Every structure is written in structure tokens, then in C-alpha cells.
Amino acid sequence: MQRLNILLSTLLVFLWAIAGVNGYAIDSSNQDDLVKRADTPSPRLGATVATCNKWRYTQKTSGPTDTCDNIVTRFKSLGLTKANLIKWNPGLKSNCSGFKLGYYLCVQLKATKTTTKKTTTTTKKSTTKSTPKTTTKKVTTTTKKSTTKSTTTSSKTTTKSTTTSPKTTTTSSSKTTTTSSKTTTSSPSTTTVAPTATQTGQSKRCINWYLVQSADTCATIVARFSNTVDKLTLPNLLQWNTALGSTCTGLAAAAQKWVCIRVEPYWLDAIKHQGKAPYAESGYQVYRNVKDFGAKGDGETDDTAAIQNAISSGNRCGQGCDSSTTKPAVVFFPPGTYNISSAIITYYQTHMIGDPYDLPRLKAFRGFVGYAVIEGNPYSAPNVNWHGPTNNFYKVVRNFIIDTTAMPADAYGTGIHWQVAQATSLTNIIFYSNPSAGTKHQGLYIENGSGGYMSNLVFNGGKFGAWIGNQQYTLRNFTFNNCDTGLFLVWGWVWHLKSMTFNNNRVGIDMTTKNNAGLLQVGSVVLSDSQFNNVEIGIASDKVASESPKSANTLAIDNISVKNCPVIVGVSGSTPKLAGTSGTMTVTSWVQGRKYTQSAKTGQDFMGSNTGFSRPAGLLDSNGKILERSKPDYETYSLSQILSARDLGAKGDGTTDDTATLQAAINKAASESKILFLDYGVYVVSNTLSIPPNSRIIGETWPVILASGNAFADTTNPKVVVQFGQPSQTGFIECTNFIVATRGAMKGAILMQWNLASTSEVSGLYDVHARVGGFTGSNLDANTCLKTPGSTAINQNCAGAYMLMHISKSASRVVFENTWWWTADHDLDLAAHAQITIFVGRGVLIESTNPIWLYGTASEHNVLYQYQLTNAENVYMGMIQTETPYYQSNPVAPLPFSVNATWNDPDYSSICTSLGGVSTCKKSYGVRTQNSNNILIYGAGLYSFFENYAQTCLSDESCQKYMTSFEDTTNIRLYALTTKGAETLLTVDNDWSVPWSPNTNLFGATIGLYQNPA
């Protein structure tokens, strides 16, 4: 697929010819698209000589298509030779094997001129060399002719580098006037050779440095390089040189050291873009740079239409399309300020990505039409969205600044409206709201959906940082600065809030919302590892013991620090539930809600400090908090550190067996310590893919690894599709953005298995999902597996997999973040989006005894269980969400599979004997633990919405008998368990159960705390 920046570059060449834009001009002495320019064009094949005067944009022409030889022939009149072409453009490689169309090549250097001012000194033209540490040296002149080794001479000199480093091209030339006593230099000292005299924390993507002088300030440095090819800004200078500090106080210590003034482009934009969507029309573009569609990012132009065109181009899934998997897109925003006049609408399966090293700013005009800068799910009519909010999957927005400060304070200026469900995320976004008195602005607005995961968000100003309501959510690492209310919770069943910081807010979290009947809307909240600084009320909750529903406003606080926060829990004008301090204090554990223990099996209404066992040390970081990691962007990596799976031979066309080529690509990247970029596609595999230690794999949107063939079809010999490490291996693996799936009846397939033991580094899976059925290419859709509630016949052709995820006994120190293990309940691509019956035997099995962390994960619609922990230890589960298969109990579990004692499957025939084998007992557990220890579950939403596709059972919570089973499990702490459709929330040691009726919430039933030992 042709890269979009090729098209853009061709257009720019045409514009430059007409208008001489930005200092570019066409050299009319040659008719072959030769460009003469004042700075360095892009894209290039890596580094090039810095003294280039003329460039050729390689392309197909009316004559011979460009090759190295054709270019040499064409520009022979300029003195070009093949040797020089290769020398000036190292990316061509020694034999021109690196030649590619769509890049600029240097074809002529600037002429070297010598002009000597008449003085009493006669000088000889210098022979110069650059060194990493020296670009300017004072010349002492005498009456004797001399040869000086320096970058400063008595004439304008072109400096030549002697190093072969890929980042080295030249040092800057200087113009010097020589007198009989001294030499003065009028240009700054810079180098593109990586120097050694630098401060710590400098950007690894740096390609140009400046030698700091004693009289320099950050402002003078920025002024010097803001209008050069470096286009330096103060935020960039500080970001690329962290030792300077946020206010440049570290500059004095940087005198006579080199600071970074330019970095190479982010590799995601620089890489060849060749993602292919096999089920879209020919020529469909997966990767889109908004500037290729006309966006300027100059802080002046209205870029709304151009950005929207970049998102929607290609007849993608927008209004009138509830869901689709066939036309994904990555929409990239280079650094800049993009003025926005109306909402930017995200389409289905879209990744909006900004440069992580220099966040692009989306700035709303003062006359902005509408309310949200980014719109995740517009209304087409009252209460009618483009996409059903609970089925609005596969959307990502990351690495942006969103600025509504220019909108009037009395407008409902909103950064993002985000009505979404699973496999979505907002990450690394800074919101700026109008801070004026009486402001109505809010950074984030959510009123519906079934999430979900968000992390690393910063909210500055506004009436609300975030105003949100959703079924369940994990929010991690949020900061609220100077908001009236930081986080306003409108409604929700389970909220998991981790590493939240509230600075200078009137209210940190507000969970007091009531409906028209006066019933509390917020079901439960778990807040951990968080802090309140200069906040009047930390958590606003006015629930009283006699208030109905009984479990509404369940609240669990775990390791919270406060500074000048008079009320930690309570409301203004009332006695605090949990008093704070004008000084500092820490709350280890405090709970408001229904509490169950081995000594309180009938439960109790509880509000107060919770004692018991300490959090397992293995799950904590060096600061005593539950360990967490963030999805990597690899922003410090250069293009040379990235390998493309498609370049290495993988097809990803949905047909070709890519097993061997993909395995070879994975092995090559790991052996060379490079990142494997999985260009978008559907990669069919017929055998296990083994991911070795030292692997880093990142997908373009969500490419699909599709298991197909006899190897995965045998239930008596289950086989892994993607295996992360062998049981005996140690090391590090990090994977992001891809889906593992099956085609047809692969009832012996274990989609993923994690074996690797990590030690010093923490491994991770981020936005890596399992999906069985419901999409084009799966052969498991309404055409083959339409629901049949009126028939007891079992369609064995719809048995899609054996297990979704196995975290084995050898696994250690791995984070699973925003991972959705999903057996489809409905079609995503067929127009009717009908309900379907797909059978997968097991969801997620965890057997590891070493630390494992799960953040914002979900496992749904599997036969025997959604999550099972067997002989496991040291497991953290931060907001897990499950759904029981809609078809059960037609058939009952384990059908169409059989119980396998080797895998410690639950035997529902035995479990349900005492109940006379009632069918609603023989349904999939949401969570089951066996002989496990040191288990933390911080928020769980476990739902059973159907009995054989009917929902009459919801009225009396009778869809399912048992939902959660803890068997021989100690040192376990469960906060905020919410169930729906289950008669019992929790069963302990097959001995006693917690019924739903004493624990009613506005939706379902909730336990605030179960703990053993108490």
C-alpha cells in the first residue's frame, strides 16, 4: 500500500513550485523535480549529509522510474556519481539495496567558497574535522601561514564528519572574521554527532545538540533555534532535557554541556505503512497522518474538516453502522496545535494517536459548535447513538493535550465525550478547561456504556475534571488540579480507582447522585494508592445506615494519604464519616458497606477501619503501592530499532498460512533486541507461535492472529495458539495491540498461554485480546451459529476454542492491562448483529504462585468458568468483569465439553447434587479459587443476564445459583463484589453462601468486603 506521506510530499512539491512555500523552490534548470531548499526535507532514508544543496524526490516518472543508476544518469550534469550518491545518503547502503520510492535523496552539496578579509594576516584555507565535543575553537593567527584543525576558519568552510554513526551527518559550518588578534564566531555550536558531555535524562531520539554557553538562558536557546530546521520550542527543550527541570533551573549546570535541540520523528509515523485490511475494498488505507489530509497544526488554521476526513475516509463504520471489524484505522497527529471548531468524531475500530514525545494540542475555537472536542459516540436523535453504548468496542485515544480554555466559561466545554464499552481506552491525555469563576467546563463526560479502562490522564481546571457514569470501569493514575470537583460519579455498578491524585479541589470524588425516586445511583467504589492534597472533602458520600438500597454507595479505601483534607469521607455540614486533618495522615483500609468473614457469615452493615492481613509484599512496588505499569509507546526508539512483519515476509491476507514467516520474524526481532511491528492484517497460523524472551511486539490497531487447522481441533490434545515463553524460560516480554482468534471449530485451541518468569523487569500484555466468533473471517457467525433457544440440539461446529487464557505455574511478574477475553455473544459485522451461540470451554486459568497483576480485564461467555485460580498465589485483580453465557442452561455446563480433572475443571454434577441437579446451578462460575493464597480482588462485576436467552429471571435474581466460589483460599481480600442475576454472590468452601437479598443495590447486589483471615 502506498504511504500517504508520499502523496502529501508530491502535493507539497507542486505547491512549492508555485509559491515557494517555507523557503522551498524548484530548480528550474532541471525538469526532473529537483528541489533546492534551505533546510532538510522529509522523509529521507535515515540520516543524510547536512551540507546538501539539492534533493531528488524519488518517484515514478513519465520516463524511467527512479533507481540509483537512473538518478546518477539524470543528474550527471551536477557532477553526481554513484559513489557520492551512496556516500551522501547512507540509507541507500553500499550497493543501493536500501533504495525506495517516496524519499528525498541528496544529489548535490553546497559549494565551498573561501573569502578572506584583507588584514595584516595572511591565512591558508583550513583543513577541518569535526569531533563530538568541539565545533568552535579560537584561532591564534601569526604572520606565518598555518594549517588549523578546527571548525572555525578565516573563511566559510564546509565541515566533513569522519564518523559512520547513522545519526551523524555534519556539524554546522561557521562564518568567521579573522583579525590580527582574535577570531569571533557568529553561529552557535551544534553537532549531529552524539556527544558525551551531556546531562542525564536526555532524549534517546536526539539527532542535534547545542553546546550551552555560560550566558545562555532557555529563552535565548529557543529563540536561536526556533526558526531553524530544529523548530525548537521551550516545552520541547525541557522535555528532551529533563535535567533542566520544569522551569529551566538546571541550565546553569549544563554550561559547556550539550543539550538536545531536535529529535528524529516518531517511528510510528516514519515507518513504511503497509497495513492491509483483507476484508475491505482494494486500496483501503489503514494508516492515516492527519497532515496528509490537509491538517496544518499551525494554531491558526481550522483543521476540523481535514481531521474528520482522515478518520472517516474509506467508507468506514460511522453513523448507521453499529459495529464493524473490517476497516480499522490508525490516525496519527504529528506535533502541533490543531484548531477545532466542532467535534472530532471517532469511528469504530479507530486508534487516534498523538506523538508521545511532543503531545499535539487539540484546541477548541472560542466559537466552537457543540460541546466535546472528541466525540466517542454521537447522538443521532434523543437517546439514540451511532453505536450502542454497551457494544461500542475497539476505540483508542492516546497522547494528546485537549484545550477548551478559549471556549466561554458558561459553555459546557468538554474535552472528550466517551460512551464506550470493552477494548477501549483513553491514555496519556492532558485536559485544560476554562478556570474562570463559575466555569461549566469538564475534561471528560461519560453518561453510559460498559467499560473499560483509562489511565494517565491529567485534568486542569473546570467545574468537573471528569463527570462520568458507566456500568464498570478501571481508572488508573489520574491527576486533578484546581478542579471544583475532581471526579463526579453519576452512576455505576463498580468503580476501581487506582493511583488518583487530587490537588486543590473543593471535592475530590462525589458519589452522592440520586435518581428521581431519591435512590443513590453509585453502587460501589474501590479507591486505592491515592492521595488528597488541599482538598476540602475527599469523598462526598451522604449514605446513612437506614437508607435504601442497602448496599448503595459501598466504598472501600485502601492505602490513602491526605494532606490538609479536613473531611476524607462525608459531606459539608454533617459529621464526617471519616475525619481528615489539616496536617497529613494515611488510611490503611476503611470500608462502608456489607462485610462478610468466616466469623460473620450472615454479614453485617459496616462502616469503619478494616484490619487484617497486610497486602502481599510481592505485589507491591518499592513505594509500598500495588505495582502498575503503563502501555508502552516506545517513544525513545529510533526507526532502525523497528522491524516490520510484512517486510519480513508475513502476508496477513486472511488466507496464507503465515506460521513459519511470522515465527521467523518474531525470532529475528527478539535476537536483535528490536521491536516487531505487526502491520495490520489477518495472519493465519496452523501451529503454535512461540514468543521468546526479549520480545517486544506492537500491532497496528489490532491485527488478528487467526488459528486455523487440524492442530487446534482436538479437545483431547489442546494446543496453544500464542505461547509467551516456555515453562523453563526467564526474561522479559512485552506485547501490545493485537487479537488472538480462531476460525471455525477449533475446540482444542488454547488461545494464549503465559509461561515466562520475569525477574528484574516486569513483563506485560497491553490491549491484547482474545476473540472467538462474531467477526468476518471467523466462520462463527449468525450464518452458522445463530442462537437456538427452542432446540436442545448442540451444534458442534460452533465449539470455537478450548480455553482463552492460561497463566501457567511458571509464570511470574507480568501485568495484564485492558485485556478482553471474549467469546462472542453477537455478530459484529453482519448487519443484523444477531445473537449467536459460541462454545468455549474455559475462560482464564491462573496457576502461578509468583506475582501477577490484572488491571481492567474481562472474561465473558465461557462454559465452565470465566476466571479460575488454582493453587495460585500473589494475584492482584483490579476490576474484573464477567458474563455467563446467554444460552445456559441450554445446554448446561460442561456441555458441549467434558470435565477434565487434569485442568481442575469444576464438576457441576457433583457441586449441584445437594440441590437436586437444578439447571441454574450448572452454569459457569464468574470467579472460582482453589487452594490459593495472597489474593486481592479490588472490584468485580459478575453478571448473569439470561436463562436460555430469556430475561424474566432478572426480576428475582434467579438466572444462576452460584456465581463466586472460594475453596481452601486464605489471605484473600475482596472489595466491592457486585453480581446480577445470581441467587448467591459468594460461596465459601462449599459450606456457606452469601444470598443476594440482604445485599441489594440499585442494580443487583453488592458485598463491600469479604476477607479471610478477618
Image (spheres, rainbow, N blue to C red):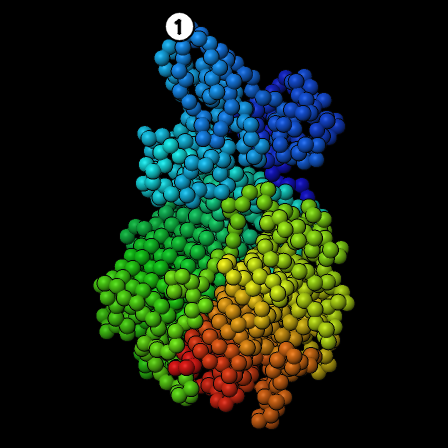
Q: Which amino acid does label 1 sit on?
A: Thr
Image location of residue 148, percent across then percent down? 47, 17
> How many labels, in total?
1
Mark 1 sits on what residue? 120
Image location of residue 774, percent across then percent down? 66, 66
Q: In this view, does 237 lie above or below 898?
A: above
Residue at 34% over, 66% down: 560
Task: Judge by depth and name the residue closer to the eye, 38 or 619.
Answer: 619
Q: Quadrant of residue 243?
A: top left
Image location of residue 481, percent across then percent down? 33, 54
Quadrant where the image shows the C terminus = bottom left
Image location of residue 173, percent across then percent down? 48, 22
**Element marked by disc 1:** loop
10 Å crowding of disc 1: few (<14), some (14-19), many (20+):
few
Q: Quadrant of residue 268?
A: top right
Q: Can residue 989 be seen in this view?
A: yes
Q: In this view, does 290 lie above or below 855?
A: above
Residue at 49% over, 62% down: 453
Quadrant where the image shows the N terminus = top right
Q: Is residue 301 visible?
A: no
